[in-house]
Each structure stands twice: as structure tokens, then as C-alpha cells.
Image (spheres, grey):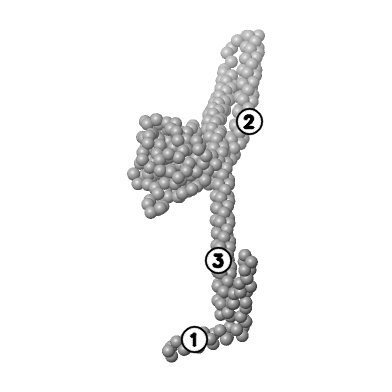
Amino acid sequence: MNNKHQKIGFFERSERFFQKVIPPRQVLIKANGTTHFVNLKSSTQVGVSFIIFFIVAWSIISIAIVAMDSLGAGNFREQALRDQENYQSRLMSLADERDFQLDLSRQAQAKFDEALGHISFLQEALMEGEIARKELNAALSLLKNKLNTSRIEEKIAKSNLDQFKQAANSAAPEKKSPIFLRNMETGKEALLAKVLSETAEQRDAFENEAYSAQLSVKNIEREMKLIEQRNEQIFRLIEEALSISVGPLDKMFRSAGVNPESVIKTIRQGYKGYGGHDLSFLDGDSETAFAMYDKNLDRASRILKNLDELNLYRIAIEKYPFYHPIQTANRFTSGYGPRWGRMHNGTDFAAPHGTPIRSTADGVVTYVGWQSAYGRLIKIKHDFGIETRYAHLSKFRVKKGQSVSRGQHIGDMGNTGRSTGTHLHYEIRIGGKPINPMKYIKAAQNVF
């Protein structure tokens, strides 16, 4: 009873409290001609108001949450779109930069070829100059010998003339008739005058010939001096061209981790035609000529050695994979190294379907066909234990056993095998072990 009275007292107190805030109301309802009266207590009104308030609050909160989710999802989508646009913009800028660097490389290659052509021209000019110098030296020696012979003959003629005069003066006159003696004396004088005249003419001819020889010697010496100055200029130009050409090539090989001295030595052993040059044309036929040319002998030998080395460098470049497999616009999409939990043994380049793929060095095709994840694959064997691989191709342009040269079109880009899009998977292996292909591509970036 006490509990029941306590509960009744609680409700009554609650009702009195609510009546102070919300008075009781009577609702009139008419239906089918009948009127009904409904009494609403204050507590009932509070309960209904609370329920309505709860429903309205829940609706507002739900609408707010949905709106916030929508705004957040929109922001995320916009952010994703912005990130994608930035990524595409970055890729395009990288592609433009790569194309720019490719143009610079092509310009450098053109300048390099032009320098080599100029070196060949200067080398031929040097050879022609030295041959002309040798011919002038021979002509100089001949004129000097002729001049010496003329002088000797002149001395002999003068000596014979003096002896003839002495013999004519010392001869004892025989006892003849005065008329005979006069005739004899007249004949001797005529003969002596004739001999003297011929000797004088011969002496004058020898002197004129000696003077002409001296003038010829001076002209030849002047021409030899001009040739020497021209050869000096040719030497200097060749040395400058060699310095511009050989230096970057040496740096390129060292950047790729290749010892250029070892490569040059190996190639020289395989190419017997590149073992040295005959410099005998630099030697004169006389001590004077030798003294004149000897100072250039070491310099010419050094230049020819550098030219020989440059030719060997050109051969080595064709045998090492410095060439980029794609010579048109492309994008670098994936590098060498771990990727998605496994090792990525090559470098990926993306370009339109069917883009020509080119051999990066001289070699022999050892495999053409399908190979699991590679799809359509080409393998090329090069010198020095190097192998290159070209995967995911759409078409082959070579056959197994075929010899290919650097830059030759060997296949077309595709999307075969385990591939997420059209691209080339390019590998370089040395001794069967994969290495980073960008090591060679970057090394040659500023050279070709």
C-alpha cells in the first residue's frame, strides 16, 4: 500500500508540475454526426511533444549526416580528380621534358657526327699537306744538288781556262817564218778568244742557273713554312675536335659502370685494322727535312692514336645498349626494382599501340615468341655477355638467328602477356643477371 501510494503521489506531483507548464486541454472530435470529447492531460501533451521533438531532432540529425557524407564524398571525388589531373599534368610535363632531352640528344648526335666528318676531312688535309711537304723537300734537295753541281762545274771550267792560258803563254815559239808566226799567233788569239767567250757564257749560265736555284729554294722554303703553319692549325683543330668527341664518350661509359680502357682493348684485339698507323710519310729525305718534321712527329702520332681510339669508341657504342628502344614520344611508367611485392627486372615505357620498338645495340636475335607473363617477347644477344629483352609486343619484325643493328625496327608495342596496358617492358641482362636499364639510357642522355 505504501508503495502504491508513493507511485500515485509521484504521478500526481508530476501531473501538477506539467499542469503549471502546459495546462490540460479538451479536444472536440465530430464524426458521423456524433461529437466526442477527448481530454488531454498535461503529461500526455508532454509525452507527445517529446516524441515529436525526438522525431524532428532525429530527422534533422539524419539529414545533416547525409549532407555531410555527400559533401565529404564530393570533396573526396574532387580531390581524387584534382590528384588525377595533377598526375596527368606531371606525366605530360615529364613527357615534354623527355622529348626536349631527346631533341637535345639528337642535336648532340648530329654535332658529334659533324665533328667526326670534320675530323676525317682534317685528317685527309693533314695527309695531303705532309705528302706535299715531302714532295717539296725532295724538290729542294734536287735543286740543292743541282746548284752544287753547277758550282763544281763552274770551278772546273775556270780551272781549265787558267790552265789553257798558262799553257798558251809558256809554249816556246818555234823558228818559223815571220808570216807563219803571225798567222799562228793570230790563230791562237782567235782560239783563245773563242774559248774565253764560251767559258764566260758557260760561267754566266751557271751563275744564272745558281741564282734561279737559290730563288727556287727560297720559294720552296716559304711554301714549306706556309704548309707548316697550315698543318699547325690542322693539328690544333683536330686536337680540339678529339677533345670534344672523346671526353663525353669516356664519361658516358664510366657513368654506365663500364671501364672504357678494357672495352677499347677488347675491340682492338677483335679489329686488327685498328692497331696503329704508318708515320713514315712524316720523315724527310734529308737531315734538314727531318729536323723540320721531327717536332710534329710525336704530335701527329698522338693525334692518330686518338683518332684510332675514337673509331674504337664508335664501334663500342654500337655494341653497348645506350640507344633508347623507343625513338618517338613515350612515357616512363615503371622503373627497375621491387613492385607489388615482387622484383620488377626491367623498365616500362608507354606509348600508342603499334609504336616501333628498336634494338638498342648490334646483336643476334636468340628468341622470338610467346613466354608466359612476357607475352610476345624478343631476346637479343650482344657482345660482352649482354642480353636485351623486349616484352608485351603486338607484332614481330625479326626472326630468330637474324643479325640486327643498333636502331633497327624489331617489333611493335602491344599489350600481350601479364600487362595492365599498352607498354614496352625493356630489360638488360649481363651474364644472365638483370640490371637497371636506365643506367645506360641516362648515361647516354647528354651524348646522343
Tell which of 259 and 290 is nearer to you.
259
Where is residue 226, by image quadrant? Answer: top right
Q: Is residue 136 left or right of residue 437?
A: right
Q: Residue furthest left?
A: 432
In the image, what residue type sits under mark 3?
Ser
Whether pointer 1 and pointer 3 mark residues with C-beta atoms closer than 8 Å, the reply is no
Mark 1 secondary-structure assignment? helix
Residue 131 at x, y percent in the picture: 53, 30
* Residue 62, numbered circle: 3
Q: Residue furthest front?
A: 33
**Residue depicted at 42% across the width and 31% down the height:** 398
Q: Which residue is mark 1?
A: 8
Mark 2 secondary-structure assignment? helix
Q: In the image, is residue 2 above or below residue 302? A: below
Mark 3 secondary-structure assignment? helix
Would residue 152 be seen by someone viewing this image from the given angle?
Answer: no
**Residue depicted at 57% across the width and 42% down the height:** 103
N-term-proximal mark, 1 vs 3: 1
Q: Is residue 163 left or right of residue 368?
A: right
**Residue depicted at 40% across the width and 37% down the height:** 376
Would residue 372 be seen by someone viewing this image from the given angle?
Answer: yes
Where is residue 268, by image quadrant? Answer: top left
For the N terminus, the quadrant is bottom left
Residue 70 at x, y percent in the picture: 57, 60
Residue 21 at x, y percent in the picture: 62, 83
Nearer the viewer's eye, disc 1 or disc 2? 1
**Residue depicted at 57% across the width and 13% down the height:** 174
Rounded to the nearest angstrom, the CA distance separating label 3 from label 2 is 117 Å
Rounded to the nearest angstrom, the CA distance separating label 1 from label 2 is 153 Å
Q: Which residue is mark 2?
A: 215
In the image, what residue type sits under mark 2?
Leu
